[in-house]
Amino acid sequence: MKKVVFSGIQPSGDLHIGNYIGAIAQWVKMQDEYDCIYCIVDLHAITVPQDPKTLREKILEVTALYLACGIDPQKSKIFIQSENPDHPYLAWVLNCITPFGQLERMTQFKDKSQTQKEGTTAGLFDYPVLMAADILLYHTDEVPVGEDQKQHIELTRDVAEKFNKTFGETFKLPNPHISKFADARIMSLQTPSSKMSKSDIDPLGTINLLDSEDRIREKIKKAVTDSEPSISAKVHGQGNGAVQNLLTIYAAFSGCTYNTAVQKTQGKAYGQFKQELADLVVENLKPIQVKYKEIRNDEKYLRQVLDDGRNFAISKSSKLILEVKEKLGLV
Ligand code: AMP
Ligand code: TRP
């Protein structure tokens, strides 16, 4: 039996090359070796305010982007989280055994709650427990995510272990599966000390998967580097510096290691390096964009893929929910 992979992305904001390099590119690679389930986690998206019309549009956009990036519905399942009510059900159960103090330590909560002008909500605080439910419902072995999600997977393991100890062996303990590129943290092109993010207010900081060629070239041209005229020998180890970040993107899109990228670009003037990097990014994103347009316009097909995914998901999760209810004395 193949091992199970589960992952998801929130349909909020525009998907960017950080999402691609840190998450989706790995998802595509894992399809042959694992039984993969990829989710559009819309219930996570509403932990911060969303405009309903935009959200509906984004859910279909993300679905089409998964497919355009190479998720193959013949091999993997794609579904919308809110279409399987077992997710919030299990989240509630897990809430009742998750220590409050552990949730208070979650970095993503601390960051996100600071940016909420109207005050933070119980939903945002509880976000990692819903994520734990997503993962545990399918006996997941591996969770391919960016490095920023590691803490949430550790919490998932802790909660699963606690449940198993208290009520008997029920959940499998999942492992994070982090891409090898810079620990899968792609940084902002403008502020390399913070990660490239859907919620970045500076549009020049992120390269979105659906950006036009001109826009991509402009953003790379304006990316910050260092005060040298060319890539110096000082730029060595991987890290979160401006130039290291560009080299990481270069490596990811040319399919080479970070060290090879360093060797290939050593001594190059930044102007030339940026031109080559822009060519690479455009070349890699073009086929995704062409495929995206085709798929996004075919809503019947999208619905078919999502219906099939939902039916599969519910057939798996409903069995586990029955087991959980029995163990808790809820039947
Ligand atoms: P998010 O954009 O926060 O919904 O993240 C969706 C997925 O993309 C998660 O697996 C993240 O770890 C990954 N991800 C998000 N931003 C980055 C980034 N800047 N670099 C690498 N991976 C990222
Ligand atoms: N929290 C993840 C993020 O921000 C998204 C997510 C929700 C997820 N549920 C998941 C990722 C389950 C992996 C598995 O990126």
Image (cartoon, helix red, strand yellow):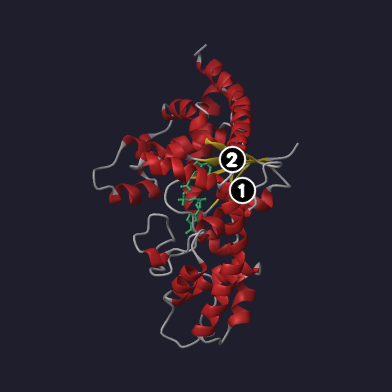
- Where does label 2 land, which residue? 302
The image shows a total of numbered marks equal to: 2
As helix, strand or loop, the secondary structure at mark 2 comes to helix
Residue drawn at 42 percent across, 81 percent down: 226
Question: Could you say which is closer to the camera, residue 68 or residue 10?
Answer: 68
Mark 2 and mark 1 in contact (Cβ < 8 Å)? yes
Question: Could you say which is closer to the camera, residue 74 or residue 214?
Answer: 214
From what the image shows, is residue 20 above or below residue 301? Answer: below
Q: Is residue 121 left or right of residue 34?
A: left
Question: Could you say which is closer to the camera, residue 207 or residue 170?
Answer: 207
Amino acid bearing label 1: Leu
Residue drawn at 64 percent across, 75 percent down: 260
Locate residue 264, reporting x and y percent. Answer: 63, 80
In the rendered image, which quarter is residue 44 located in? top left
Q: Specify the label residue 67 is tagged with.
A: 1
Residue lying furthest left in this view? 118
> Looking at the image, can residue 221 be seen?
yes
Crowd rating for badge 2 (residues with CA inside 10 Å; few <14, some 14–19, many 20+): some
Locate residue 165, reporting x and y percent. Answer: 54, 27
As helix, strand or loop, the secondary structure at mark 1 comes to helix
From what the image shows, is residue 84 above or below residue 262? Answer: above
Locate residue 30, reporting x and y percent. Answer: 68, 49
Residue drawn at 24 percent across, 48 percent down: 117
Mark 1 and mark 2: Cα distance apart in space: 9 Å
Q: Is mark 1 within 8 Å of ligand 1?
A: no
First-in-chain label (1 vs 2): 1
Locate residue 183, reporting x and y percent. Answer: 54, 60
Q: Is residue 107 left or right of residue 276?
A: left
Amino acid bearing label 2: Leu
Q: Is residue 91 left or right of residue 6?
A: left
For marks 1 and 2, give the one nearer the viewer: 2
